[in-house]
Amino acid sequence: MTTKEKLKSLTDEELALEMAKSLDILFFEEIYNRYESLVYTKCLSFIKSKIIAQDIAHDIFLKLYVSIGKFEGRSKFSTWLYSLTYNHCVNYINRDKDAKMMRNAIDSDDLLNLQSTEDELQIQALEVEKLKAALEQIDPEDKMILLLKYQDDASIKDLEKIYEIGTSAVKMRLSRAKSKLMKAYKTVRI
């Protein structure tokens, strides 16, 4: 079995832990190959500029390489990387508050992949174009938690790790974000 085949057979968590031990570029390359597209797509969902999204994605991978030692294997590697990506993108947006395009650039194409609770059934019934317009009216933090939960299928536990808050705080943020989305939706005229 070649080195590349051995690397491909490792789980994400095994790769990350081995990379943390050795900082071997081969482990990093394998992680990069597995996640480059996902990280870039998530960056692009925050920032509609392909060039800036590519730059931010590269920054995230540099940050990953430098901070891989902080990954302890207590959570899935993908959750840890997602948290790193999310925080980096939010920090970028917060540093550039004057650029409205940056704050309002969440891509909402797949938001209708919602689970079936009473509130979520209401959101599923919304018209897509009107929903996109409503998403553009709410705060980026509210958009993000909704997209993480319903577009990316993040669990409450995943959201706890990403936001570094407890279960009740996650549920409260989701509830408030849904309320704001519903209020914005009612004001949209298409």
Image (cartoon, grey):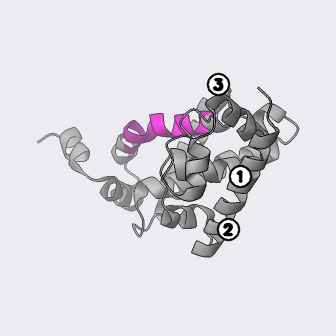
Question: Which residue is pictured at 46% across the width and 36% down the height?
Answer: 36
Image position, residue 151 (x, y; %):
52, 44
The mark nearer the N terminus, 2 or 3, is 3
For disc 3, the marked residue is 51
Q: CA distance from mark 1 to mark 2?
A: 11 Å
Image position, residue 30 (x, y; %):
34, 42
Q: What's the magenta bit mostly, secondary-structure-wise? A: helix
Which range of residues does the magenta coloring cover?
31-44
Q: Nearer the viewer, residue 70 or 105?
A: 105
Q: Secondary structure at mark 1?
A: helix
Please state which amino acid type lies under the numbered disc 1.
Asp
For disc 1, the marked residue is 142
Question: Quadrant of the rendered structure where residue 179 is?
Answer: bottom right
Q: Residues within 10 Å of mark 2 (few under 14, many from 20)?
A: few
**Left or right of residue 93: residue 65:** left
Image position, residue 97 (x, y; %):
85, 42
For disc 2, the marked residue is 172
